[in-house]
Image (spheres, coloured by chain):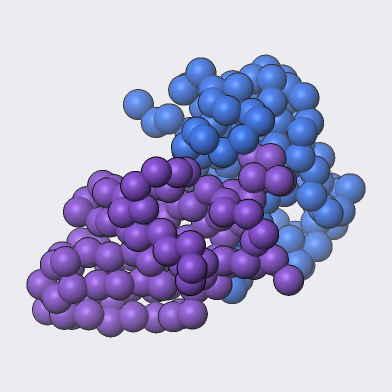
Chain colours: A purple, B blue
């Protein structure tokens, strides 16, 4: 079945440590790929997106993500986490054959400990 | 200035009632969306409108009816509310109607609780 998987429901990292959030998708063609962040009580904010070209994408707030076609993955990374990064992170996929519909993963809650 | 705004932020109501959630965007975008985020945090698209025309209609009960008076507004009306309608509803907008090359900007969400 076509889907977006975020295997980690919760992740806890220490402030200053590096972070990697995983995202895998299963669609026939390479879709458009997105990462969104949702802070408590807030809407979703786009961190970064991948459409084509360079597979390492830079986003806002020091985040980056790497598209790996062979692994059908689009993992989000940050070299040094700040306490303000605590939030829920959603990977989203825009299957090209489905027009402008975004399909979201279940989200990963990031906790940052000091 | 809020790009995508929703009202109300919280909505608590009884089963069987009819309620509306309003959404407005001041980005000049042509396409607007409604998403539902359930208790397990799954976000799923419900509707998409482009220039007041419905272009995506997922499998949503017909108790849900989007209404777009103009391209800056997409309101969601829900009839005969049920317990399972309790969720957070997000409005979004984008410029690109035919694909995903444009960013979708999300509103802050409306938390609907049906008692």
Residue that extends furthest to the right in the rendered view of this protein: B62
The residue nearer to you, when weighing A24 against A55, is A55
**Residue A85 x, y percent position in the rendering:** 24, 63
**Residue B92 x, y percent position in the rendering:** 55, 39
Residue B8 found in image quarter? top right
Q: Give the answer, above or below, for where B50 lies relative to A57.
A: above
**Residue A29 x, y percent position in the rendering:** 63, 54
Left or right of residue B53, residue B110 in this image = left
Residue A64 found in image quarter? bottom left
Q: Give the answer, above or below, for where B55 lies relative to B111.
A: above
Left or right of residue A58, residue B84 in this image = right
Which image quarter is the N terminus of chain A in? bottom right
Residue B47 found in image quarter? top right
Task: For residue A9, say whether it is visible.
Answer: yes
The residue nearer to you, when weighing B100 against B95, is B100
Left or right of residue A36, residue B11 in this image = right
């Amino acid at each position: 079945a076509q889907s977006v998987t975020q295997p980690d429901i919760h992740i806890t990292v220490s402030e200053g440590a590096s972070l990697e959030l995983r995202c895998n998708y299963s669609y026939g063609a390479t879709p458009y790929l997105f990462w969104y962040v949702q802070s408590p009580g807030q809407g979703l904010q786009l961190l970064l997106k991948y459409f084509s070209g360079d597979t390492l994408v830079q986003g806002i707030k020091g985040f980056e993500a790497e598209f790996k076609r062979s692994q059908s993955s689009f993992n989000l990374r940050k070299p040094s986490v700040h306490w303000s990064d605590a939030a829920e992170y959603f990977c989203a996929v825009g299957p090209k054959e489905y027009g402008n519909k975004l399909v979201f993963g279940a989200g990963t809650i990031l906790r940052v400990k000091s | 200035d809020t790009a995508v705004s929703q009202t109300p932020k919280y909505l608590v109501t009884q089963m069987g009632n009819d309620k509306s959630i309003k959404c407005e965007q001041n980005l000049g975008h042509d396409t607007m969306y409604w998403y539902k985020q359930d208790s397990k945090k799954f976000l799923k698209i419900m509707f998409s409108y482009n220039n007041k025309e419905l272009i995506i209609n997922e499998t949503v009960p017909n108790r849900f009816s989007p209404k777009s008076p103009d391209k800056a507004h997409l309101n969601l009306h829900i009839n005969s509310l049920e317990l399972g309608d309790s969720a957070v509803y997000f409005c979004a907008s984008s410029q690109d109607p035919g694909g995903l090359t444009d960013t979708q900007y999300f509103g802050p969400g409306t938390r609907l609780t049906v008692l």
